Amino acid sequence: MNSEILHPGVLDVLQSLSIPHEALLCDPTLADTAQFCEHYGYSAEQSANCLLLGSTKGEPKFACCVVLAHCRLDVNKVVRKKLGVRKLSFANPDLTKELTGMELGGVTPFGLPGGLPLWIDSRVMNCEKIILGGGNRASKLLMPPDGLLLLPEVEVVEDLAFPIAESE
């Protein structure tokens, strides 16, 4: 199953929760979603991005959100309100690596630090299978989305994201 290509912490979580998955090898230079989909022939409608966001003022608060690649996360309304902060931004690559141990292009909900809320857009759950980061830029996961529901701190959120208009 090539699982050894996954980040070791990610593999530990998948195995401990008996989550069915397929590990896919990925050229690290093609790990960003649009490039990955184009090169490997997957659609944005089945590719899920795992995004870390944090407050920009006051006490640091973070959340991880999973949305399909053809959707845009509703940062200013839904995420900001759920997190209970006034200002919010995407974590930069250094902060993402510091908090998750993972690089952009490989971030996945599996192996996140405890206490970090994990919010999944409800559209993700409608897919037969999704593509997610494997915890590093050299791997991806192909799996049924219901495996996400076995993770701690998880909540499926209606309209966490919205489809990107064709013209954007």
Image: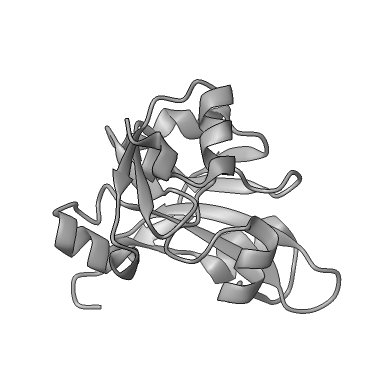
Q: Which residue is pictured at 50% across the width and 45% down the height? A: 120
Q: Is residue 78 left or right of residue 162?
A: right
Q: What x and y, as percent, mark residue 33?
A: 31, 63
Q: What x and y, as percent, mark residue 43?
A: 19, 53
Q: Is residue 115 left or right of residue 128?
A: right
Observer able to see residue 110? no
Q: What x and y, as percent, mark residue 90?
A: 57, 72
Direction front: furthest residue: 4
Q: What x and y, as percent, mark residue 26?
A: 29, 55
Direction top: furthest residue: 18
Q: Quadrant of the N terminus?
A: top left
Q: Is residue 162 left or right of residue 158?
A: left
Name the residue nearer the viewer: 36 or 90: 36
Q: Quadrant of the C terminus?
A: bottom left
Name the residue nearer the viewer: 125 or 148: 148
Residue 133 vertical placement versus 156 (above, below): below
Q: Which residue is pictured at 42% across the width and 54% down the height? A: 67
Q: Which residue is pictured at 66% across the width and 71% down the height? A: 95
Name the residue nearer the viewer: 48 or 28: 28
Q: Which residue is pictured at 21% across the width and 59% down the height? A: 37
Observer able to see residue 109? yes
Residue 167 vertical placement versus 3 (above, below): below
